[in-house]
Image (tube, rainbow, N blue to C red):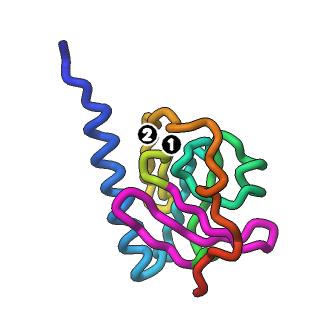
Amino acid sequence: MPIDYEPYLNRAFKRLVKEVLEEASKNGVPDESHFFFTFQTNRADVKMPEFIRVKYPEEMSIILQHQYDNLNAGMDAFSVTLAFGGIPATLVIPYDALINFSDPGAGFGYTFKPELPKEKTPQKAEVISLSERRKS
């Protein structure tokens, strides 16, 4: 039976995304770049305000370029504050929830084989309210 390289590639590229986000959290996204993410929203470990989850019940895409705050690359997830219709909201996105990551300015992209959601409906305790967002 041949080796299934896809899980190895997924882990390696999740580490790459983490390292790129660590650099961006310190120095910002380089002017010639922008990060485009698509991720699963129907996982219990994805944290976001309910008004966003209702609008994007399965997956959503975000772009990090100039207008974001509080970017933090953790061990298993990253968090970022974005504005949705002028309302700031913090998202916590596990690397395991990523479907796609690309930096069109660098001509780079990778599509992950996403893991199955842990739960279809998140528990209320796992949804971030707007009052929980960190101040810049």
- Amino acid carrying label 2: it is Phe
Q: Disc 1 on helix, strand or loop?
A: strand
Q: Are marks 2 and 1 in contact (CB under 8 Å)?
A: yes
Q: Callout 2: 10 Å neighbours few (<14), some, many (20+)?
A: many
Left or right relative to 54: residue 89: left
When the figure is inspected, residue 32 is found, relative to residue 1, above or below; the finding is below
Question: Between 74 and 66, which is closer to the camera in this rendering?
Answer: 74
Left or right relative to 96: residue 1: left
Question: Between 125 and 29, which is closer to the camera in this rendering?
Answer: 125
When the figure is inspected, residue 114 is found, relative to residue 66, above or below; the finding is above
Q: Which residue is mark 2?
A: 112
Q: Which quadrant would residue 7 be assigned to in this image?
A: top left
Q: Residue at x 81, y 67 (%)?
A: 85
Q: Disc 2 on helix, strand or loop?
A: loop
- Amino acid carrying label 1: it is Ile
Range covered by the magenta-colored residues: 70-93
Q: Residue at x 55, y 52 (%)?
A: 46
Among the two numbered marks 2 and 1 on one chain, the one whose residue lies closer to the N terminus:
1
Left or right relative to 87: residue 111: left
Q: Which residue is mark 1?
A: 99
Q: Position of residue 37 (x, y in %)?
A: 54, 53
Magenta span: chief secondary structure: strand
Q: Position of residue 63 (x, y in %)?
A: 60, 61
**79 in magenta:** yes
When the figure is inspected, residue 64 is found, relative to residue 116, above or below; the finding is below
**61 in magenta:** no
Q: Measure how far apart labels 2 and 1 are at the Cα level.
A: 5 Å
Q: Residue at x 52, y 61 (%)?
A: 35
When the figure is inspected, residue 44 is found, relative to residue 132, above or below; the finding is above
